[in-house]
Amino acid sequence: MGQRIVRIANKLSANIIQELIHDDIVAIVIEGYYPAHLCDLLSHNILHSKEIDPYTHEVVEDKVLLQKYFGVDRIGIPFNSTYNITSPAEINNYYGEVNAQTERLRRYCEYYLSPIDKLRLELDELFVPGATVGHFENKKMLAGIVRISKAEKSYLSALEPHFDALPPKYAQLDAQLAANIYVKVPDIGGELEIWDIPALSPFTQAPDQWRAQLPAPIKIKPQLGDLVIFNCRKPHAICAFVGEERITTQMFMGYQLEKPLLLWN
Ligand SMILES: O=C(O)CCC(=O)C(=O)O
């Protein structure tokens, strides 16, 4: 099989989303999805935020679930950070903070339509049967976090691929996609690499030296304001970069046959 395509368009459409869900294409790039002046406004407010924390990825090593830091920081609590937590009070902290975090992203956008709100609306308008914020434990999830990387730590995300897969106890998904809107991009580097192999199941243990064992990745160099959607159960990594910060607003999209897309972080 030759390299499959990355669908580049200037508008999201129902067909494009279906193509990605059915694995007919590797990724969607909607160029200039969010206007440059709003990217600048939002990234300025993000960089002045006092609420930036490390983003960790769940990784299985020797059958143990660990949280690993790959040099990406975040504003907003991602649900995967609760996977290792057993205390209900701490898990409830995720749900308790949802509304404040949604409100904060809107505030950082100074009440212009946020990139996440734009995407949520368009997915609901375009996709039959719609798109809605997830409710895996009968409580509404957060949909939309900010991810910030700095050049000096960017090599950490480049070393080895990772993948994101919601544990099936929350929802049995037929596909899991990640949507990123790039509100600040470095000039050199920072490409998204995606390995076009079959999507992995939750809790798959990645082999040591995974990168060396995989075929050549597909590389996407996001430009300011671009929306990129891909199947995040496929291995992916972010190339090292130089220069200013790389900032995205991100959410996951869960697909189940004939059901609305479930949106969360
Ligand atoms: O920042 C990116 O380009 C990709 C982010 C990522 O790893 C994800 O959305 O799962």
Image (cartoon, rainbow, N blue to C red):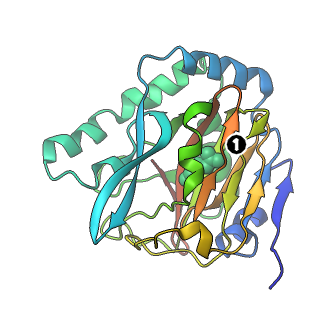
Report x, y in % for residue 114: 62, 30
Q: Quadrant of residue 106?
A: top right
Query: At 55% across and 21% down in the image, what residue appears?
Result: 46
Q: Looking at the picture, does residue 255 appear above or below residue 224?
A: below
Q: What residue type is disc 1 on?
A: Gly
Q: Residue furthest bottom?
A: 1
State the quadrant of the N terminus. Answer: bottom right
Residue 244 appears in the picture as rendered: yes
Report x, y in % for residue 217: 71, 66
Secondary structure beneath disc 1? Answer: loop
Q: Which residue is mark 1?
A: 190
In depth, the one of 171 and 209 nearer the eye is: 209
Q: Residues within 10 Å of mark 1 (few under 14, many from 20)?
A: many
Q: Looking at the picture, does residue 174 appear above or below residue 99?
A: below
Query: At 52% across and 68% down in the image, what residue appears?
Result: 209
Q: Is mark 1 within 8 Å of ligand 1?
A: yes
Q: Looking at the picture, does residue 129 appear above or below residue 185?
A: below
Report x, y in % for residue 143: 48, 43
